[in-house]
Amino acid sequence: MVRFDKNKIKSLEKIYRLNLINSCTGYKSANLLGSIDSEGNTNLAIFSSITHLGSDPAMIGFVLRPRTVPRNTYNNIFNTKYFTVNHVKAEDIKDAHHTSAKYPKEISEFEKTKFEPEYLDGFKAPFVKNSKIKFGCKYLNEYNIKENNTILVVASIECLYVGKDFLEDDGWIRLDKAETVTINGLDGYAKTKLIDRFEYARPKK
Ligand SMILES: Cc1cc2nc3c(=O)[nH]c(=O)nc-3n(C[C@H](O)[C@H](O)[C@H](O)COP(=O)(O)O)c2cc1C
């Protein structure tokens, strides 16, 4: 095993440390966040920190990097309160990754990639048309993480769309069948294969 202690981590070359620390917590979700500003400029960006916060009420959170540079996704969400979360399929990873490029707010990543915006059932923010699993969210709150100037954004799930073929009778979504990819580190995208599902775990007698 290669051991990295705290001092060693601190002294690592920047990109090496970035790769190492971004990979060590395991696979992360791959989602495209769709948003729009009050002038109608759309925005799409890849995020790996979307996480489940609770199911009743249905809530998610994500971590936003420090606002030392313009953050279009955050500004749109803060101003309009709405955004969408769209799963990424294996065939779309190149364009999905490209949405992390820093375009000014007047230039939409929907124009620079193959993704098409889609407005569903009056929801204000754009969805990704070909995404098989997607949901619309409303900003609820944010928490500053003062230790590193990141922000935890908390949002409610307002509407959810799941392709029929991936929705099981008990509500479970079969992500591997939908070809939803997962993120390894900051630039690696992986396919998944389901191994098994289990009953609710109870202590052994
Ligand atoms: C794989 C990957 C995952 C990312 N995850 C996040 C994230 O969780 N939070 C974040 O603030 N930025 C994340 N980014 C960076 C954003 O995609 C990038 O800052 C993007 O330019 C934001 O666009 P915007 O300014 O239009 O909102 C990630 C980038 C990549 C490549």
Image (cartoon, helix red, strand yellow):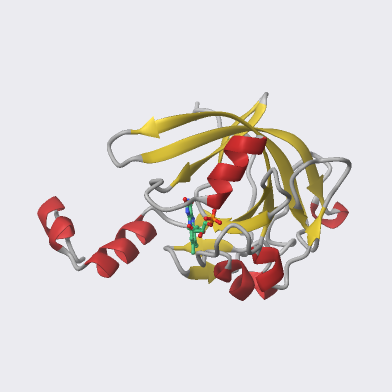
Residue 173 appears anywhere in the view: no
Foreground of the two, 52 or 158? 158
Q: Position of residue 100 (x, y in %)?
A: 52, 64
Please tell me which residue is depicted at 75% across the width and 51% down the height of the picture: 126
Asked whether, in this view, residue 178 is left or right of residue 72, the answer is right
State the count of labels: 0
Q: Position of residue 56 (x, y in %)?
A: 67, 24
Asked whether, in this view, residue 50 is left or right of residue 164, the answer is left
Foreground of the two, 185 or 136? 136
Relative to 86, say whether 108 is above or below. below
Asked whether, in this view, residue 17 is left or right of residue 199, the answer is left
Please tell me which residue is depicted at 24% across the width and 65% down the height of the picture: 14
Q: Position of residue 86 (x, y in %)?
A: 69, 54
Relative to 90, say whether 32 is above or below. above
Q: Position of residue 179 (x, y in %)?
A: 70, 65
Residue 176 appears anywhere in the view: yes
Asked whether, in this view, residue 153 is left or right of residue 37, the answer is left
Foreground of the two, 173 or 118? 118
Foreground of the two, 30 or 172? 30
Placement of the N terminus among the 4 image quadrants? bottom left
Q: Residue 177: name its quadrant.
A: bottom right
